[in-house]
Image: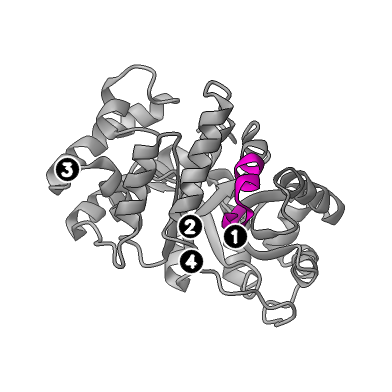
Amino acid sequence: MATPTSTRGAAPAFSPTKYVYGTTRLGDARFPAADRVKMARAAMESGVWFHTSRQYGDALEILSRAFDEDRTRVPRMIIKIGNNDLAQLRANIRENIEPMGVDHVDVGQLCLGGRYAEEFRGGGRCFDDFRLLREEGLVRNYVMEVFPWTSGTSFGALRAGYTEGVVDAFIFYLNPLQRFASNALWDLIREKGAPIVAMRTVCGAPVHQLRDVAGTAWRPYLQERAVEVAPVFERSGVADWAEFCVRFAFSFPGVRATVGSTIRKANLDAFVRIAGAGTIEPLPSETVGELERLQRRWSDSVDIRAEPWTM
């Protein structure tokens, strides 16, 4: 069993920028490559951290082109890494960092399956593997990816204390329409004060567009939730959906950052402006309470019953 209190290979401080630029859209070939490189450069110049993955089309190659224009501005990055054992994990790390011309992962987003997922839940050898990679300097910090259908894995590890000293935060969709940690895991994270990285800041589009414009919501459940969330947003007194979403995430003390993807410079500027404040004002408590009640219901009735990757 892993020793949760081990100090071997202590991690550097985990201090992301409050807004982290999501690079999903940089891999969208519908946009000219030169425009995507320009967008990456704009995000680099803003000084924010990045979030990326080999899964995002040719985003890594676009980032490499942007980095080559000024290697002094290569941002710190959260990078999806994972698989079932150490050899596969090393190979996956190489798949991600080599195209960008970087030699390490600042923060590895652990996407675990098979044996590694079971070991994570039960405090097994995977934790020693994670420490080894950190000692080697290949990965500096770790965050654990959570979905409704994987919440039990993180719940078991966090409750037993296995994540202490290894995992710096839990990362999952957290916005007014989605909270992809199960109710049990969410309650435990908040009880223990575990740090959170909130993904998918604005849930893909403004709430009224998700509600009213056919095809905006990629699954029917999001349109249905938008019907319920739109009145909460309207009563809040906040005029801007992006501001509403950022303030919602930072209404929870454990949230360290919110990750939002965009291909538009104006949206990037808005995220940086809203999340760049020294202190982000939480939403009114009654607004947060309304959304939390909705999310608890959705989690029990829909999220934890969903087949993997269907929502």
Measured Cα–Cα span from mark 1 to mark 4: 9 Å
- The residue beneath circle 2 is 197
Q: CA distance from mark 2 to mark 1?
A: 8 Å
Residue indicated by mark 1: 143
For marks 3 and 2, give the one nearer the viewer.
3
Residue type at tag 4: Pro
Q: Quadrant of the N terminus?
A: bottom right
Report if residue 67 lies within the magenta region.
yes
Left/right placement of residue 253 relative to residue 303 reads left
Q: Percent x, y for residue 231?
A: 17, 37
- Nearer to me, 206 or 227: 206
Q: Which mark is residue 309?
A: none
| Residue where numbered disc 4 is placed | 195
Element carrying mark 3: loop
Whichever of callouts 3 and 2 sits on the residue coming sooner in the sequence is 2
- Sequence-wise first label, 3 or 1: 1
Residue 288 drawn above or below residue 223: below
Circle 3 packing at 10 Å, graded few (<14), some (14-19), many (20+), is few
